[in-house]
Amino acid sequence: MQRTRLEGNFRKRLCIERWKVRKILKPLEHLTSIYGVGLRREHYPYLLEKPDTDIDWFEVISENYMNTEGRPMSVLESIRKDYPVACHGVGMSLGSATGIDRKYLKDLKRLIERVEPFLVSDHLAWNDRNGIRLHELIPVPYHEECLEAITKNIDNVQNELHRQIAVENISAYFNYTSSSMSECEFVSQLVRRTGCLLLLDINNIYVNAKNFHFDPMDFVRSIPKESIAQIHLAGFTDMGNFLFDTHAEPVHQEVWNLFETSLAYIPENVPIMIEWDEDVPEFYRLEEELNKARKIVKRGHKNEAEKTSESVL
């Protein structure tokens, strides 16, 4: 009886917290164009020259600009004058069993107020335990207890930040024996319970599909389409017996193929970006990769228009 009462109180409190979120959510900033790349320090000198680029917006790693008044922040403020930005975190630890660090949220909120990003995101992972920060994104087990804990964490974050956040599917290299549902089932439930958005990483879906032997399109078809707020495209490294999500190479053709097939399940005008974090090339190479995405999307729209025309005739 006591367990039932506690569970009932827990669920009631979550409903109240979600009601608060619905009252204070801010809509995404309208983007006239949707193609972006990550802002990396290797490109600071070039971008400060204010060149004409093929880029519509930049994604920044939130932690690189929190609690700093140095060069990174001055560069970001300069970029922000000309481009929309999205804040993408790696340290929120949404999967933490002990809740979200209050100081971290306070610092993130200060950054958000300063640069006004059109989207704030982090990963479906944990990397903080008892104040010890791990420099990896650790996957979470996919079961009800974990789902309730992360639901609570996301509700708290969205209420504190006064906005929806987007949650990214991560690459993983082991499974938990305690998991009772698939990754896509877990993600879908999380979106429905919290009203959060989804940052869909196409490369991570492909990497996990190859490493754990499932059809990547099963994942894409199963998630709530209306929740997709951003797309990540990146390169993996083939380690021989598994694929490793390194962001150190161009987008592989298999990932481009998955992206093109997935377009039928992705809303139009969702922001798309190229991630390249290791062995970062010159800026023009990022533009070349991004223009590949443009061509694929344009081809998809053309094919869809032709199908519509044929159905009318």
Image: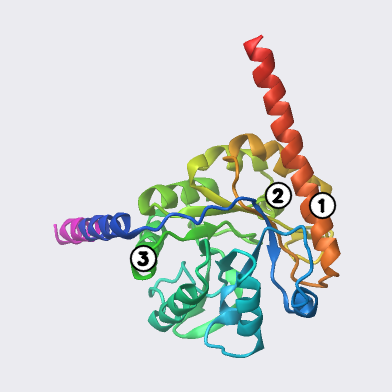
Q: Quadrant of residue 103?
A: bottom left
For the residue marked with disc 3, what is the amino acid?
His
Q: Is residue 260 above or below residue 140?
A: above
- Check disc 1: other Cα within 10 Å, few if <14, some if 14-19, many if 20+: some
Q: Quadrant of residue 72?
A: bottom right
Magenta span: predominant SS is helix
Q: Quadrant of the N terminus?
A: bottom left
Proximity of marks 2 and 1: CB atoms separated by less than 8 Å:
yes
Secondary structure under tag 1 reads loop
Q: Is residue 255 visible?
A: no
Secondary structure under tag 3 reads loop
Question: Which residue position is annotated with label 2?
Answer: 206
Q: Is residue 40 above or below residue 20?
A: below
Question: Which residue position is annotated with label 1?
Answer: 252
Residue drawn at the location 59% of the way across and 63% of the way down: 84
Q: Earlier in the sequence, mark 3 or mark 2?
A: 3
The magenta segment is: 1-11
Tell me how the rendering is colored. rainbow
Q: Is residue 47 visible?
A: yes
Residue drawn at the location 85% of the way across and 62% of the way down: 285
Q: Position of residue 5 (x, y in %)?
A: 15, 58
Residue 94 belongs to magenta span? no
Q: Position of residue 37 (x, y in %)?
A: 70, 62
Question: Which residue position is annotated with label 3?
Answer: 162
For the residue marked with disc 2, what is the amino acid?
Tyr
In the foreground, 311 or 223: 311
Q: Quadrant of the C terminus?
A: top right
Residue drawn at the location 49% of the way across and 47% of the way down: 227
Which label sits in the foreground, 2 or 1?
Answer: 1
Q: Earlier in the sequence, mark 3 or mark 1?
A: 3
Q: Position of residue 100 (x, y in %)?
A: 40, 74
For the residue marked with disc 1, what is the amino acid?
His
